[in-house]
Amino acid sequence: MALKLIGSIYGDYHSKYVDNIYMTNDETSVVGQAYKLSSGRWTKAVGTDRIYAICYKATTGGTDELGYMELVKPGDMIEADYTGSPHADFEPGCETATLGNADGSNIDASDVSSGHLVILNDDTVNNKVICLAVKNAIVAS
């Protein structure tokens, strides 16, 4: 699975799509992966990086390719698979969960040292988690 926005703690969820910012040259975008902005361009987010957006339409690597992203706003709820052996603190209420370092499309259950995702629900049977985004893109109303 990949990261998926499923709602907001503030009530009705309204997606905000951005398709006018370029990808980092030669970097592909993959649906369901987390992305951040670096030097004014989208690049994959991993580990403790803030999640600015989740890709909704894949692109191939090239020069000046536009990225197709759904912005992640503070208070958004994200559903994802988690990988790694869960740390003892990886449970609802954990406020420092991180993205997986391999591809930014899952949560690393073994690393709860300095992330920014808050665990709301942990499904240990299916290795899925719902987490709350707290440090992300800020969108004007």
Image (tube, rainbow, N blue to C red):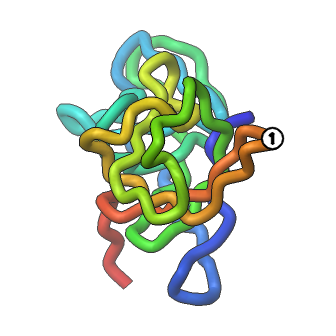
Task: Work out whether residue 113 or residue 98 is closer to the camera in this orientation and state it.
Answer: 113
Identify residue type, mark 1.
Answer: Asn
Report the residue at 73% width, 51% height from top: 123
Q: Is residue 16 left or right of residue 64?
A: right
Query: x, y percentage for residue 134?
Result: 35, 64
Q: Residue at x 43, y 48 (%)?
A: 89
Query: Callout 1: helix, strand or loop?
Result: loop
Residue highlighted by disc 1 = 126
Q: What residue do we see at 36% from left, 31% from top?
A: 47
Callout 1 environment at 10 Å: few (<14), some (14 to 19), or many (20+)? few
- Which of the image's four quarters has the C terminus? bottom left
Q: Residue furthest left?
A: 39
Instruction: State the image coordinates of residue 4 (x, y, percent, origin top left).
Output: 66, 50
In the rendered view, tell whether residue 75 sits above or below residue 98.
Answer: below
Q: As drawn, is 21 to the left or to the right of 7?
A: left
User: Compared with residue 134, is residue 89 higher up or lower down, i.e. above or below?
Assistant: above
Residue reaching furthest right? 125
In the foreground, 115 or 12: 115
Quadrant where the N terminus sits is top right
Q: Is residue 97 visible?
A: yes
In the picture as drawn, the residue positioned furthest to the bottom comes out as 11
Q: Is residue 49 above or below residue 24?
A: below
Picture quadrant of residue 125:
top right
